[in-house]
Image (tube, rainbow, N blue to C red):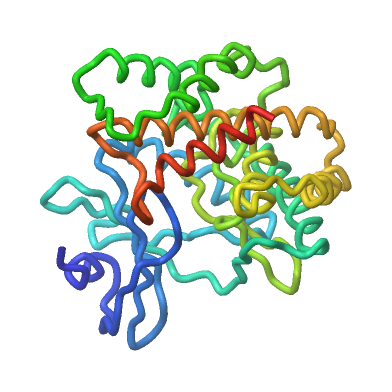
Amino acid sequence: MDITAVCRQFISDRILSSLPLGNGHINDTLLVKTDRSQYVLQRIRPQMDVEKLSHNYRLYSEACLNAGWLFPTFLNAHDNDKYHTDGEGFHWRMYPYIDGDTLSAPLSSEALFACGQGIAKMHAILNNLNGTPKAVYPVLHDLSHYYAEFKELLAGDNLSALERDSVTEEIIERRIDEFVKPASAVSSIVHGDAKLDNILFRNGQVVGFLDYDTVMPGLPAEDVADCIRSCCLRNGVYDRDAAAILIDGYSSINNSLTSDEIQSAFRKICFELGLRYYTDAISKEKKFKVHYPGYRLGKAKTLLAIADQ
């Protein structure tokens, strides 16, 4: 792909370099350095609904601006749209690089507490939207959907039996009924991908979030749980003390969730993602990016083992 040509749809700067950025599993993200500044360039999947993305952007950008909250501010392409569509049908977008700190696990106690506070602040901002976002991923966190995909794969022609694992499948079948139960919590507007990589820090405090593509009505406990998954798991071991500090941070601003509700959501999130990784591992058609041989199966085993505790 001609990255310079894509960049020319948004900026006239002289391109100095473009390098992969972040650990996203879906979009291809590049850090573009020019003679004037730095930008983030993203190629998103053709099946993502640009109309929904644009609708949601109008809502959350207004709310974030009013709150002084950092977020990706997309540039207009030369045709005055936020997206450029290339000849292969891929959608591209670009925004100025945000000068903030993205932290890596393990976090200090202070950072964990601030992380929880940041999610609570973000929830408050999202629930002041002037309208309702449209779900770009309507099946996100829909465990019934992912389980149906898994069963369909087992019975179909796309199954690749090379990485099938009987212990993993036993856990899935034994615990699915517990985790697939309809949630009783009240739904509100959530980020949908509140992992540590998407949280922006400055001077030890959360000042914004990245990647609002998954903004939609959902369960706040699952946002908190997903953040716990991203920063309180080390080498397959769940650090409950670290999770408790993050939950305390959230509760210091929003006390509508109990620790038990969040811990239950955490186990469900681990089960859901473990099931998705396992389905991907044994499918001929891959969705998740792979970082090393056996990555998908290894992630599945780790997450499902935690959910099974």
Q: Quadrant of residue 288?
A: top left
Q: In this view of the protein, which residue sits in the foreground, 120 or 107?
A: 107
User: Residue at coordinates 37% horizontally, 20% vertically from top-left?
Assistant: 149
Residue drawn at point x = 65 percent, y = 53 percent: 231
Question: Count the marks: how many?
Answer: 0
Instruction: Give the position of the N terminus as an image quadrant.
Output: bottom left
Task: Locate residue 281 relative to residue 58 in the image: left or right.
Answer: left
**Residue closest to the far front:** 166
Residue shown at the point (82%, 64%) measured from the top left? 110
Position of residue 290 relative to residue 278, above or below, is below
Which is more toward the observer, 264 or 78? 264
How far across and down, in percent of the image, does residue 38 sit? 41, 77
Residue found at the very far left of the displayed protein: 87
Quadrant the C terminus occupies: top right
Q: Position of residue 232 (x, y in %)?
A: 69, 50
In the picture provided, is 208 more to the left or to the right than 2?
right
